Amino acid sequence: MEQNYRSTEVILNAANIVISNNRSRKKKALWTQIKGGEPIDVYEAMDERDEANRIANRILQGARYGDRRYDDYAILYRTHAQSRVIEMYLQSYDIPYRVYGGLSFFQRAEVKDIVAYLRLLQNSADDVAFLRVVNVPRRGIGDTSVDALQAFATARTQPLLHAIMQLKDGDLSKAAREKFAAFAEMLSDIYMQFGVKSFPDVVEYLLQVIGYDAYLQADRKENYEARADIVKEFVGYIREFTESLDETKVDVLSAFLENVALFSATDAMDEENGRVSMMTLHSAKGLEFPVVFLCGLEDGLFPSMQSIYDPEKLEEERRLCYVGITRARKKLYLSCAKQRMLYGKISPTMPSRFLIELEDALPAEAKPAPKQPQLKSAPPQQAFGISVHSLKSNGAHSAIQREQSLPETKPVAMDASYAPGQRVRHKAFGDGTVLAVNGAAASSIVEIAFDSGTNKKFAAAFAPIEVL
């Protein structure tokens, strides 16, 4: 037996139950003098958006209207790619956060590279985008050649890409001219795909033509699999973004870049109460928080697909789950989704075997109820037939504590429409008036003048806004 001085008995009991399924582990159990504790909240979301929306809503209620601080909360996930949707909801709720041990999704090099290419395709005079991608992947264009091109362009007051078209013998070295010309010709070829291919397919074509995957594989400094997953998740986001748009009527490239700009902004939020910590489970070792959200508990995600048929790897995944559970000191939220879009694919999912293992901690009256077939239009069902399971601790009081939930913000419908002059209410900013609406359906950006005097823009598909 080993004493844990921080987590409650309820949380440690859950951790002990999960890790006891590892056959190679020496038998020992954590114990604490902090008897009882808040019940563990288990939630089965409709999808990854419902999951992220609920997390953001719980944090907002606790930190802005309750007695918690933002830095009391941590959100743990198995893969970096899972952070995208969660970050988009946290930003839409105006919740400050930091990604521990890494960068936020939209600040990662892979995302910024793709966005820079798209910005340059949209605006050939974007010199900042040009300088980011002219040698990514590496094309043998060195700093000396770029400096020479900049001097040439400045002397003629031309954007860098335009200046390439004006290069003549003697302006730069022959090798530099040829490499710049090849770069410009490649961009022209990609640009010509618009109107022929769908926007997501143009992005896929771009990545193929520039050889981005091979570039990531050749970079030994960073983990290839993690970086490739970020690229797949970003392309998946592009597909999700465009699926409800008519590309013959909407400038999808401009609409997409405008949405990305909202989530890429690094404007300082009110951090008086600290910031929510987001991290992968691997980064969470050694850290503890009063409240922890452990999300994405689905077979194939956590545990990972590679580990399901490998007993050794599966036990390592279970140890990660144990680590995740024991990061919580007072309150633990566990969640899974009925279906999840990840890497651009929507797949039905099954609850993680680690959640199933935790059923042994439930009192008899809280055993899982048989699931009934649900229509797609049905409201979200609660996990295992109830919202919250009180995971029973030895000697601790326990029973089903049905969730006394505050009203959830309904996810924005893909066809939600706003109009200038409408009165609306935002979960964090309160009441306001719609000033302008740009875009349509999932691409809509809503600008609101709040009664508090603040003006804000939101991606309508993620913001917790209701029409009054």
Image (cartoon, grey):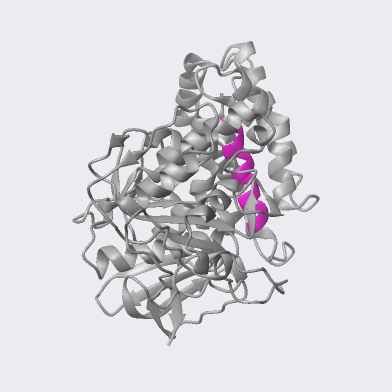
- Give whichever of 21, 200 is nearer the camera: 21
Could you say where residue 193 lies in the image, as x and y percent from the top left?
Answer: 76, 45
Q: Quadrant of residue 374?
A: bottom right
Could you say where residue 68 lies in the image, as x and y percent from the top left?
Answer: 23, 60
Residue at (59, 45) in percent of width and height: 234
Q: As displayed, is residue 212 above or below residue 262?
A: above
State left or right for residue 121 relative to residue 272.
right
State left or right for residue 119 relative to residue 326.
right
Q: Does 233 appear in magenta?
A: yes
- Give whichever of 22, 287 is nearer the camera: 22
Secondary structure mostly seen in the magenta stretch: helix
Instruction: State the extent of the magenta-drawn residues as a range.
Output: 226-240
Q: Quadrant of residue 206?
A: top right
Residue at (68, 29) in percent of width and height: 210
Could you say where residue 51 lies in the image, as x and y percent from the top left?
Answer: 51, 60
Q: Does 434 appear in magenta?
A: no
Q: Is residue 310 visible?
A: yes
State left or right for residue 193 relative to residue 370.
right
What is the quadrant of the N terminus in the image? top left
Point out the residue furthest to the right here.
196
What is the quadrant of the C terminus in the image? bottom left
Point out the residue furthest to the front here.
395
Q: Is residue 185 visible?
A: no
Could you say where residue 133 lies in the image, as x and y percent from the top left?
Answer: 55, 31
Q: Quadrant of residue 408?
A: bottom left
Point out the residue furthest to the left here.
272
- Give whichever of 19, 58 is nearer the camera: 19
Residue at (52, 53) in percent of width and height: 360
Number of marks drawn = 0
